[in-house]
Image (spheres, rainbow, N blue to C red):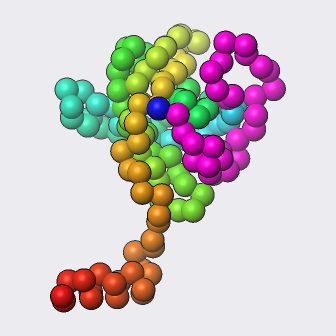
Amino acid sequence: MKLSAEQFAELAATFNAKASPTEHDRRRAARMELQANIKITPIHSGNRLSAMHVIVSDFSARGIAFLHATPMPLGQQFITELPRKSGGVVELLCTVAHCSIIGHNAYRVGAEFTCALQTDPKHIPANDPRELQRIKESMLK
């Protein structure tokens, strides 16, 4: 899965990400370097495990890389929640593509976006009086 240009731009804006200063010929998508704390939720046998926080080192329209205290096996899936500039979050299912040791109890994990779990980009705050009225009216019909 590849994020659209609009989706990528919105997510990059929430992180204040900067374009990578080095170009890599083998890259399928440009990387944005950053340091941000995000939540990931590993998936095992179709079940969500306990969520954990990791530090993102870069992301692109195709995937994300982060630092982690333990290795993650290739093919491991997890859900990440990325904040939207307009509010709310988008949940993306990711699959680990590579994992390398970078120090004592420090690993760099790279994962590809597999699919979006939450596709509706519209975010309506819970206290929006117009939305509350619309819900009340739909329930009374």
User: Can residue 11 be spotted in the picture?
Assistant: no
Q: State the image coordinates of residue 106 (x, y, percent, origin top left).
A: 53, 18
Residue 69 location (% of width, % of height): 47, 22
Visible residue check, residue 124? yes
Q: In this view, does 38 lie above or below 10?
A: above
Extreme right residue here?
Answer: 21
Chain part drawn in magenta:
2-31
Task: Residue at 52% x, 34% y: name it.
Answer: 2
Q: Quadrant of residue 80?
A: top left
Q: Nearest the camera: 5 or 14?
A: 5
Left or right of 77? Residue 19 is: right
Q: Judge by depth and name the residue closer to the eye, 1 or 69.
A: 1
The spot of residue 62 in percent (x, y) is 55, 30
- Image quadrant for the C terminus? bottom left
Residue at x-position 48% and y-position 26%: 112
Q: Depth check: 66 or 138 in front?
A: 138
Whether residue 4 appears in magenta in the rendering, the answer is yes
Count of numbered circles on the image: 0
| Residue drawn at the location 62% of the way across and 49% of the way down | 6
Residue 52 position by quadrant: top left
Would residue 21 appear left or right of 72 to someone viewing this image? Answer: right
Residue at image position (65%, 47%) is 9
Q: Does the magenta stretch include residue 59?
A: no
